[in-house]
Image: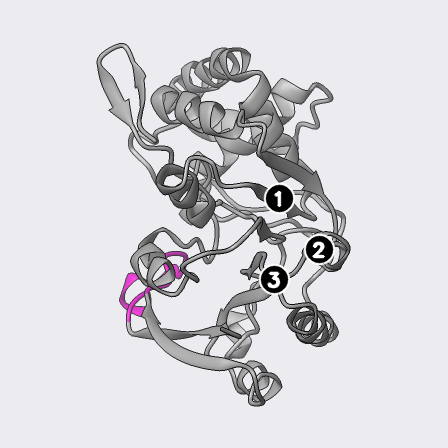
Amino acid sequence: MKQQYGQILTTPKPFVKWAGGKRQLIPILNENLPETFGTYFEPFLGGGALLFHMLTERQDQKCNISDLNSDLVLSYTTIRDRTEALIISLKNHEKNYQKDSKSYYYSIRESNPRSQIEKTSRLIFLNRTCFNGLYRVNSKGKFNVPLGKYSNPNIVNEENLRSVSHILQSSKVAIQCRDFESVLRDAKKGDLVYFDPPYQPISDTANFTSYTNKDFTYDDLSRLAELCMNLDSNGCRVLLSNSNSKEVADMFAIKPWKINKIRANRSINSNSKKRTGHFELLIRNY
């Protein structure tokens, strides 16, 4: 779906940069989708790259999307319902950032706004201006990423925000804040569930699981593997992305799982030379 605003056509894309975001892998993910399925579920929504691609290609697709990060879920509903007010707030951030980027960035990082618009515009502003576009919070739930080195960050992408808003307004898209296991209550035979959880670390330095103030642990991975088995028993189609780690491969080394190793770049490594040459796993039961 390409939506026309004035004379400009824009296809919606993620409005936040997210560690492990899937934009670069869309062609491979698309090839690995089943030809037909019922409702699409995505319980680790993150940046939503596959969701936006799917809604662009399949305009009548029913989608049930969720995440445990309440600020992120709030951002999706704010963009859906109150885009124009959000754009005004982001323009205000942009103006103040241009006057004194460092002091303004850290004052906003310390702030704790209460309103829906200001919470969402703070999240997008910090995501656009912080180091490597990384979303990370500490154990107290406070955003703790330093200022990035950008000469002119794209803080207000009006076209994309309006395009995302339009596509999320479909009555067929439901957005919820909840734990990933809740999907078992809703997904039925023939539905597709795509899991893109925080990845299992493949080295001590690669341990990044802090999207919320609760890390995604090995126990969570075990819960996820068990959930995948239960969904499979219920006749759901399951697609899972994860790191090329022994723990993940071992958990899914049984029928009906098929494991593909795919090449992926890691866009958040601070050393650009270490962003390429990585592999990750794509696991499915169909």
Q: Quadrant of residue 63?
A: top right
Compared with residue 65, is residue 79 higher up or lower down, i.e. above or below? above
Q: Earlier in the sequence, mark 2 or mark 3?
A: 2
The residue at which mark 2 appears reads as 183
Q: Is residue 223 left or right of residue 259?
A: right
Q: Which residue sits at x=76%, y=54%?
A: 182
In percent of width and height, residue 276 lies at 29, 68
Label 3: element kind: loop
The residue at which mark 3 appears reads as 209
Label 1: element kind: strand
Q: Which residues are magenta?
A: 265-276
Residue 64: give its label.
Answer: 1
Q: Amino acid at mark 2?
A: Val
Q: Residues within 10 Å of mark 1 (few under 14, many from 20)?
A: many
Q: Residues within 10 Å of mark 3 (few under 14, many from 20)?
A: some
Compared with residue 125, is residue 230 higher up or lower down, i.e. above or below? below
